[in-house]
Every structure is written in structure tokens, then in C-alpha cells.
Amino acid sequence: MKLKLICIAIVALMIFIVTLFIGPRLISPFGMTGIEKQILFSIRLPRVIISVLMGMALGASGAVLQGILRNPLADPYILGISSGAALVAAAGIITGVSFFGVFTIPVLAFTGALITGIFVGAMGWKRGGFWPDRLLLAGVGLGFLFSALLMLIMSLSSNEGLKRATLWIFGDLSIADWSLIPYGFIFIVVGLGISMFRSKALNSLILGDDLSHSLGFSPKKERFILFISVGLMTAASVSLGGMIGFIGLLVPHIGRFMIGSDSRILIPVSALGGGVLLCIADLIGKSVLSPMELPAGIITAILGAPYFLYILRKKDVLSF
Amino acid sequence: MTEIVFAAGLGDNIVGVTSYCDYPEEALSKPKIGGMSNPSLEAVVLLKPDIVIMTTNGNSKEFEMRLRAMKIKTYVFESRTIVQLPDGIRLLGEAIDEQERFDLLASDIENRLNELRARKQATSKKVLFMIWPEPLMVAGPGTAIDDAIDLLGAINIAEDTNIQYPKYSIEEIVRRSPDIIFIGKATGMDMQGTSSGLLSRLSYLPAVKNNKVYFVSDNLYRLGPRVIPGIEELAEYLEGSEDSMVRGENNSLLKK
């Protein structure tokens, strides 16, 4: 199993490197011109890093969330985190907040995402712990409320800038910039670290609280810790590049089809799978209609969904 | 549309406008009938207009059908480019029986366009007009902005896309390296602040390095009489960048 994981990691790394050099126009790694170097280091590299980070965060948090909520339809955005991020960002733009300079929108989005996460957590908390169904419903409910409020702001405002400024929430990697990477990196690595560290506990949670308890874990505590890791990863990924669909929901399922549902391997595989998929999707999105760009979120779904449906038909046992 | 009718001196006859009609100022106090693409039929009917003037660039065909079905006289303005604008205005004048006023306006625009054509640059500069920096949206073909750039003898580096306001590749901007970058204003937004992130990432571009980034008005965002001052504005910067950079200094972001 370890070997399989290492192989997947190496393949993923190779894909990341290759996507750096191919793009709307090929850059040869040997004999780059000055301008090509600029493009490679200040435009392509940060963008690839951000798509990898976002894809990893989404893939891993999908795998974790489906486990702690014991629901195969859970995806990181189901907790309403992205709607909260968009709402706070839009509200900030309207009121003219700008004390973080270029970071204003990412910081607002991250704050919104965290507040929503805490809110959903508080709503899903009863008798000393999280209740999966409560969490899920609280997330869906808040998500609806926040998107309705966002729509309200948008339709009441004749502010054209606001409409354009909030477009990024629907998934936009072109805003990728070096300055954001360290922050995103810290939150995503911490979240990923926590979830991998607690992956054994996640395995037990999937079996049910009673079994988890008898295996020596405290289901309430584990669910809490894992929820925090998901919140961190999702909030960071939304503030890096908005919402990218499909990855959080379906990449963990593809991972389960391929390597089974042991979370110890599923989490890293979903993370790598998410990173690879988003990276390739973005490459296609910026290349097919060059010099125009298509949002990566469209491509992830167009690429991923048929493959997902294909394996869904091929496998006769669903391993959730 | 509202702007054209106001410019022809018939502002007082307007009984209702959309929520997008924010110029001239008097338009703001007119009753609103809803948005550009989703006006309220009820509101229009209640205002009992003699004629509803629509445009193919923004209003929906369905709405026109519904108005006609309700026997409300409707005129659709079809000009899409600056060149077509004067004739469009004349046709509109015919449609509402105010030929004289509208012919006057049309000829005035035509004359001033010809004057502007004379200011065409000998060397064709490469221009990029940004509508919004992040996510990056630029003015493509079929917009009044593209027409204006063309009329002044410059080249819009985004003219090879096939939509009006494409989401453009930053990489391609670096490769095509525009001589001048214009950034249009958006209501209620501080464009200098909003653009500073993108511009600092593009700081190695000659246009950015040499302070050839200009923040301009939204005069060219709508096809109407204001395209004239809009073109003049671009012309000034195009000419200004010819001899010195002084002119742009107050306007340029990187002056510090």
C-alpha cells in the first residue's frame, strides 16, 4: 500500500511539473527567453502551486467530511463555508473595507469561511458533541441563507464593480499570486496533517460511534478535531481561488474505487487526486480557447464526471 | 439610450428608465422600471409611455415581444458600433418624429468623430483596456472601446477573441506586451486599489514600468454621445505618451 502511495505521489509530482511547461504556449525548459522566465516564475508557477494546494485541500476535506458525516454526498461546500466566504467578501467590498490592501478579498473570504464554520459547528453541537446530521443540515440551511443574502446584496446594488469583484468566488485561478501562497500553504498543510494524523480515528468513525468507542477512540472528540481540519482546509482553499466544484465530492469516491476506503491511504490519495485533477483542468481551461480563459471548475466537472460515471457502472460493489 | 434622448434635448419627455441609467444626473430622478435585462413589464405599463425605446445590446428580445403583444409602441435601437451610431440616432429620430433634434445630434457626433479620426496616430501602439483586474476582464471586439482604439489607429491586443468582454490570459498580456494599459472605472470601486495587485504582478511589463497605465472614465462603456469625450480621453493619453510621460503622472499608479 505504501508503495502504491509513493508511486501515485511521484506521478502527481511529474504531472505538476509538466503542466508548468505546457500551457497556452509551450515553454521549453532548455533555453528560456527572459520573457518566458517571467511567465514561468511569476505567472505559471504560483498558479500551479495554488491549483495543487486547492485541489489537495478539497480532495482531502471531501474524504474526511464524508467520513465524519457518514454521508457519501457530503462535500466541503455543503457546510455553507463558501457562501459565507462570498457573503463576507461582498459585504466588505460594499462597505469599502481595504485595510489589507491586495489581501482584502482573500482575508475577508477567509474570515467569512471561518465564521460560517464556527456557526455551523455551533448549530450542529448538542450534548457535548457534533451530530453528523445536524451538522449537515445546519450547513445546508446556512448555505441557503447566505447565498440568498448575497443575491439580495447583488440585486439591490447597482454597483458594477461589486458584481465583477464577486465573480472570483465561482472559481478563478487567474488571481493566483505568490503573496497568498504562504498563508494558504500553512492552513492547508496543518489541516491535511491533522486529518492524516487522525485518519485511524476517522476509520473508526465510519464504522459508527459505538464501534469507534469500543476501539478506544472518543467519537465526539475525534469528530471535533477532524471538523476543524476540514474547516481550515476549505476556508483556505476558498480564499485562494473561490469555489471549484466536483473535486471535494467525487474525487474521494474515485479514490475509494481505486484503493478502497481505508482513510489512512484514502486521504492522501484524494488529496493528490484533487491536486492533479485541478492542475490538469486549469491547464485545459487556459489553453483550449487561448487567449481567453475558461474557469477551471467547469473543466474539473467535464473531465471528472464521465470518468466517475464510468467507474460507477463498472464496479458492482460500492465501497462506502 | 437614455443618454441619447437626453442629449437630443428630450430628457423631460422620458417617463421611466432602467436602474442602469445613471447618466446624466437627471436620469437618476426618473422612475425606475427595473434592470437592463429584467425590466418589470408592470412598471412599464403603469407609466403609459407613448413609445418604449430599447436596444439590442442589453435588452431582451422576449421583453420586446411582450411589449408588442400589449400593443405598446416599441422601437429597437440596433447600432452596435461607433461608426453606426450617427445613423442609428437618425433612425431613432425618424421613429419618434423628432428628426430635427436627432439629426443635429447625429451630425454633431459625426463631425467630432471626423475630427478625432484626424488625430490618428502614425505609429500604431498596442493597447489593452481592462474592464476589471481580478478576475481579469478586458474589452474585446464589438465594443465601443475596441472601435475607439481602432479609430485612433492603435491596436487592441485583445481583438482576436470572439466575445465582447473576454476573461483574458495574463500570460498572453505579458507576451503581447501592450504599450499602454487603460483601466476603466467602475461605479463605487476604487480602481487604483483594486488594480494594484495585478499591476504589481505585472511590474516588469514595459507599460507598467514606464508609467503607461492610465485610469480612465466609463464614457466608452455605452454606445451614446459620451463616446466622444471617451475617445478624446484615449487620444490624449495616446498622444501624451508619444512625447513625454508627464501627462500621465498624476494619473498613473506607480508614481510613488
Image: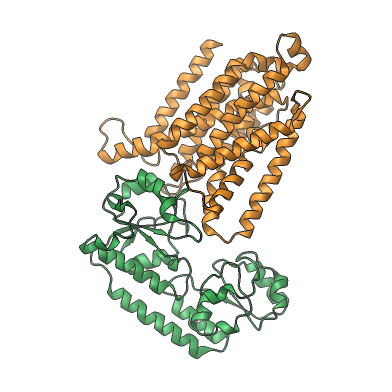
Outermost residue toward the left in this view: B243
Q: Is residue B98 above or below residue A221?
A: below
Where residue A38 sits in the image (x, y, percent)? 31, 39
Q: Is residue B203 above or below residue B40?
A: above
Check the rendered structure and report the hue given to chain B.
green
Q: Which chain has been coloured orange in this picture?
A: A
Q: Quadrant of the N terminus of chain A?
A: top right
Q: Is residue B161 visible?
A: no
Where residue A80 sits in the image (x, y, percent)? 66, 38
Where residue A302 sits in the image (x, y, percent)? 58, 39
> Which colouring convention does the figure follow?
by chain
Residue found at x 33% / y 36%: A27
Camera-side residue of A262 and A89: A89
Residue found at x 42% / y 39%: A177
Camera-side residue of B239 and A35: B239
Outermost residue toward the front in this view: A99
Q: Is residue B69 visible?
A: yes
Left or right: B145 as drawn, with respect to A263: left
Outermost residue toward the top in this view: A215
Q: Is residue A1 above or below residue B28?
A: above
